[in-house]
Amino acid sequence: MLFQAFIAFLVGLGADSDIGSNSKWLFGTLNAIIPLLFAFGFYKHYAGAYNAYLVFYILQLPKTLKGVVTNSVATYVFLAIYIAVLIYVWYVRKKLFPDFSFITAKKIKGQYVFS
């Protein structure tokens, strides 16, 4: 996550904007904050961080699948890594928080169940 935040910061710095001269620092910082917040949430074991990461990751799937049409090996490797990370985060969240179904707490026979 720290490496991802560093890359996001560099992408934000590289973005040319007509807003002003300091806007590249603003965009770089805003791009880096999101991965750092996820890293903090994972470090502190917040269920919301895992749920938000899964939702954001799943929402980016159509954009990822758009590149599969090119039939390059790099695209398939990236897709394999993408799916592996998604399954791993889901697995870790399931082990840390067995009381959650997809996003909310499990409901059995009309009542929320926590173990």
Image: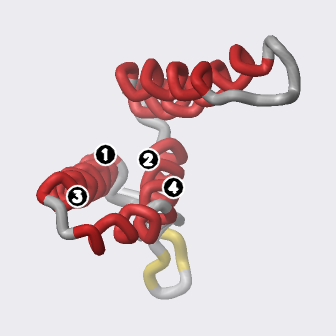
Badge 3: residue crowd in 10 Å (few <14, some 14–19, many ≥20): some
Kindly state the secondary structure of the residue where label 2 is placed: helix
Residue depth check, mark 2 versus mark 4: number of the one nearer the observer: 4
Question: What's the residue type where badge 2 is placed?
Answer: Tyr
What numbered label is drawn on residue 75? 3
Q: CA distance from mark 2 to mark 1?
A: 10 Å
Q: Position of residue 69 (x, y in %)?
A: 29, 74
Residue at the spot of label 4: 56
Q: Is residue 84 visible?
A: yes
Question: What's the residue type where badge 3 is placed?
Answer: Thr
Indicate left or right for 102 with 90 as reference.
right
Residue at the spot of label 2: 50
- Pointer 2 and pointer 3: residues touching (CB < 8 Å)? no
Is 90 or 58 nearer to us in this picture?
A: 58
Q: Work out whether 39 lies above or below 67.
A: above
> Splitting the image into 4 quarters, where does residue 58 fall?
bottom left
Is 41 or 80 nearer to us in this picture?
A: 80
Indicate left or right for 23 with 8 as reference.
right
The quadrant in which the N terminus is found is: top left
Q: Is residue 95 visible?
A: no
Figure label count: 4
